[in-house]
Amino acid sequence: DDFLSVGTSRDDPDVDLFTRAWLANAVHTTTEISHWADELDMTLVRDRDLGSEFQIVKRNYRNKVPELKDEKGRVHQAWLGSKARQRLTVHGKISYRLIVLRKNGEANIDLQ
């Protein structure tokens, strides 16, 4: 999923646009998720940066930051949300990650 990069402000106008257009109630860092997991007797056991691993910025976005205005006049919320997501990803303000949580006390499963 998309996670806020550590050091990126939720007050950033692009982050605000993304959360509204992508219909995300809020964006969080994996550090915040880890703290919440601790409170729920869970442990963050895997945090994979899929964006880096699969070179999303290079392969999907061609290293380009999109304009948030469309020359064809499109203003649909999903279009705007996808462009805001691309913009934030290319700028490194959000990252595409896979996290795995384990309930403490559960049998260990090898994640390799």
Image (cartoon, rainbow, N blue to C red):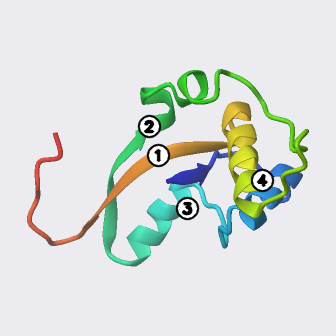
Within-10-Å neighbours for mark 1: few <14, some 14–19, many 20+: some
N-term mark: 2 or 1: 2
Query: Does residue 80 appear left or right of residue 102 in this picture?
Result: right
Disc 3 from disc 2: Cα separation: 18 Å
Give, as a three-letter code, the residue at label 4.
Leu
Q: Badge 2 is on which residue?
A: 50
Q: Badge 1 is on which residue?
A: 97
**Do labels 2 and 1 touch, CB within 8 Å?**
yes
The secondary structure type at the circle numbered 4 is helix
Quarter of the C terminus within the rendering: top left
Residue 98 rendering spot, x and y as whole percentages: 40, 49
Query: Which label number is shown at residue 80?
Result: 4
105 w.r.t. 32: above or below = below
N-term mark: 3 or 2: 3
Residue 21 rendering spot, x and y as whole percentages: 75, 62
N-term mark: 3 or 4: 3
Give, as a three-letter code, the residue at label 3.
Glu
Give, as a three-letter code, the residue at label 1.
Arg
Disc 3 from disc 4: Cα separation: 27 Å
